[in-house]
């Protein structure tokens, strides 16, 4: 995270935030509380909108009967829980505004089975600034897919968190440096100011 970021062109950049929705933000996260992630994400959203950078808000949701959810035989299942009616609604701090794009996914990553790639490419976006919860699940899955599709990635470490600190650290130190630039909210804001 030591190298400064190059200036960011608002016309070719998109801010993509993963799963900042009530049912996920309400969980306990590490190495920082989800409230801190949301606060940094909101700073990024405000700066992006002010500069004309595309804001993409991604959330996970399923049909009422759950028929579009994955059901596979795995060694470790996701914890079963009763979801409140508004679990998939974006938190107020990053509620979609006019000009934003919202993407609904039905699995970990935001590219598979959605129109995210189409939306970004048709708008000429080549750089993705990425954050959200959880670092090692939704964010990492989306980051890997973006890398394989040739997007330049800026991964905002302090706008992410996981259910376990070691999972966050593994993604940020072992995976993300190989597929993009790991940065901070302040560094991204400074790069925008330099453009």
Image: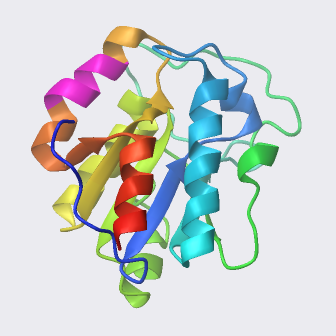
Give the image quarter of residue 110: bottom left
Task: Point out residue 27 in the picture as x, y percentages from the top left corner.
Answer: 66, 18
Colouring style: rainbow
Residue shown at the point (36%, 29%) measured from the top left: 136
Does 170 appear in magenta? yes
- Please determine whether, in this image, residue 4 is positioned above or below residue 34: below
Q: How many marks?
A: 0
Task: Point out residue 32 in the picture as x, y percentages from the top left corner.
Answer: 52, 17
- Please determine whether, in this image, residue 190 is positioned above or below residue 97: above
Give the image quarter of residue 182: top left
Residue 165 in view in this figure: yes
Residue shown at the point (40%, 24%) measured from the top left: 73
Specify whether 17 is left or right of 128: right
Q: Residue furthest left?
A: 178
Residue shown at the point (39%, 55%) measured from the top left: 190
Quadrant holding the N terminus: top left
Along the line of sight, the residue nearer the viewer: 82 or 142: 142
Specify whether 103 is left or right of 117: right
Does 185 appear in magenta? no
Specify whether 152 is left or right of 23: left
Residue 109 in view in this figure: no
- Please determine whether, in this image, residue 130 is positioned above or below residue 169: below
Along the line of sight, the residue nearer the viewer: 104 or 48: 48
Quadrant holding the C terminus: bottom left
Task: Point out residue 161 in the picture as x, y percentages from the top left corner.
Answer: 48, 25
- Please determine whether, in this image, residue 25 is positioned above or below residue 60: above
Report the magenta residues as a range: 168-174
Residue shown at the point (61%, 27%) measured from the top left: 36
Task: Point out residue 64 in the picture as x, y percentages from the top left corner.
Answer: 80, 46
């Amino acid at each position: 995270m030591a190298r400064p970021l190059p200036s960011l062109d608002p016309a070719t950049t998109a801010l993509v935030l993963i799963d900042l929705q009530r049912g996920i933000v309400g969980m306990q996260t590490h190495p920082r509380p989800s409230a801190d992630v949301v606060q940094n994400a909101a700073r990024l959203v405000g700066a992006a909108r002010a500069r004309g950078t595309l804001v993409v808000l991604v959330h996970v949701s399923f049909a009422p009967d759950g028929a579009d959810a994955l059901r596979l035989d795995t060694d470790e299942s996701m914890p079963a829980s009763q979801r409140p009616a508004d679990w998939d609604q974006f938190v107020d701090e990053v509620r979609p505004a006019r000009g934003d794009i919202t993407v609904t996914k039905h699995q970990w990553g935001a590219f598979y089975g959605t129109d995210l790639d189409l939306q970004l490419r048709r708008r000429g976006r080549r750089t993705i600034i990425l954050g959200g919860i959880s670092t090692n699940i939704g964010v990492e899955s989306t980051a890997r897919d973006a890398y394989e599709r040739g997007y330049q990635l800026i991964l905002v470490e302090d706008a992410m968190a996981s259910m376990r600190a070691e999972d966050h650290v593994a993604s940020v130190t072992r995976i993300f440096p190989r597929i993009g630039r790991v940065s901070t909210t302040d560094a991204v804001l400074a790069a925008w100011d330099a453009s």
